[in-house]
Image (cartoon, rainbow, N blue to C red):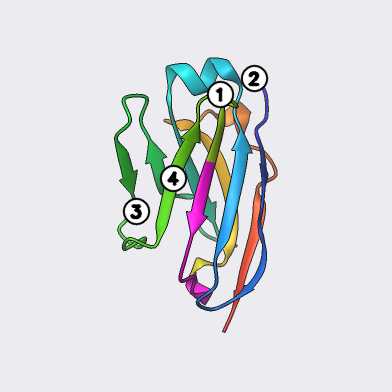
Amino acid sequence: QVQLVESGGGLVQAGGSLRLSCTVPRSIFNANHVGWYRQTAGNQRQMVALSQANGVKTYGAFVKGRFTISRDNAGNTIYLQMHNLTPEDSAVYYCNSFPPSDDSWGQGTQVTVSS
């Protein structure tokens, strides 16, 4: 399995925006649901957003309309556009298929939101 590589994280003030990117191997991108997950220290990873192969999108309850997941089919890249960030959104964000593949977790990208 190939580890996925996330990018786009950083430090942002509360209320700010970030866009995360992840290039997904074509075999996963075409055949599976893909999504974003996040994890804070001492907690399990939680699903943030999913993009199903049929185009249906699903979001965690905490997103509340602030995030948008999208897919660039030509570049087999998925994005997570995040707006109105709060300190509670601070976490390491990962991309993976759904259900996630244990072999595909990458290093993630750190998002830190200051108050």
Comparing labels 2 and 4, the label whose residue is closer to the camera? 4
Answer with left or right where residue 58 lies relative to residue 43. left
Relative to the observer, which residue lies in front, 72 or 95? 72
Question: Who's the residue at 44% across and 16% down the image?
Answer: 31
The part of the chain drawn in magenta is 79-88
Secondary element type, mark 4: strand
Q: Label 2 sits on what residue type?
A: Gln
Q: What residue is shown with label 4?
A: 69
Q: What residue is shown with label 1?
A: 74
Q: Label 3 sits on what residue type?
A: Gly
Q: What residue is shown with label 2?
A: 1
Comparing labels 2 and 3, the label whose residue is closer to the camera? 3
Which of the two labelled residues, at mark 2 and mark 1, occupies the earlier sequence position?
A: 2
Residue 60 screen position, x and y as percent: 34, 53
Which of the two labelled residues, at mark 1 and mark 3, occupies the earlier sequence position?
A: 3
Indicate whether 109 appears above or below 85: above
Q: Label 1 sits on what residue type?
A: Ala
- C-alpha gap between disc 2 and disc 3: 27 Å
